[in-house]
Amino acid sequence: MPTFITIGYGDQDGYDRTDPAVRDAAHAHDARLRAGGTRMGIAGEPVQVRNHDDAGTEVRGGAFLTSALPVGGFAVIEAASMEEAIEQVAGTPCAVAHGVVEVWPLRDTP
């Protein structure tokens, strides 16, 4: 079955202005996804790793990419298609609480 990486973006303000019943349903949705085998977690502090030309590793604190909303978390899901993956993430907290979820198909390396 195809694998997808999801990145959820959202902030506390969007979460707080979402109806508590909607938030509770979204957390229950996440619990069902986890029970079905989805691996998900809350984003910690990132680092950037470089090793240009294999000349030595350089590590810098912070994210390389930036967005209007902070990264809330990640998940690895399995779904038969992109459409099914979208259905799975549409009920998650970031999607319903004024955030956004990106869905990236994970392809095998050549």
Image: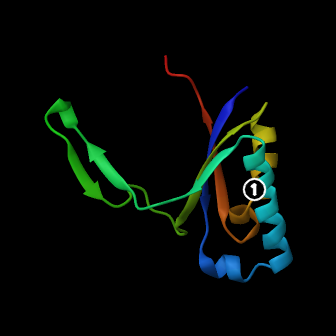
Q: Which residue is mark 1?
A: 30
Color scheme of the displayed model: rainbow
Task: Find residue 64 and report its horizontal and vertical position in percent.
Answer: 37, 55
Residue 90 visible (yes or no): no
State which quarter of the image contains the N terminus: top right
As drawn, the residue found furthest toward the front would be 35
User: Which quarter of the picture shows residue 94?
Assistant: bottom right
Residue 4 visible (yes or no): yes
Q: Amino acid at mark 1?
A: Asp
Task: Find residue 14 and report its horizontal and vertical position in percent.
Answer: 67, 77
Task: Find residue 37 and report its horizontal and vertical position in percent.
Answer: 72, 40
- The image shows residue 56, relative to residue 23, as above or below, that is above
As drawn, the residue found furthest toward the left would be 55
- The image shows residue 19, relative to residue 59, as above or below, that is below
Residue in front for this viewpoint, 94 or 20: 20
Task: Find residue 33 and report its horizontal and vertical position in percent.
Answer: 76, 48
Name the residue located 66 percent from the left edge and 61 percent from the top edge: 100
Name the residue located 34 percent from the left edge and 61 percent from the top edge: 62
Q: Secondary structure at mark 1?
A: helix
Name the residue located 77 percent from the left edge and 78 percent from the top edge: 18
User: Which quarter of the picture shows residue 4?
Assistant: top right
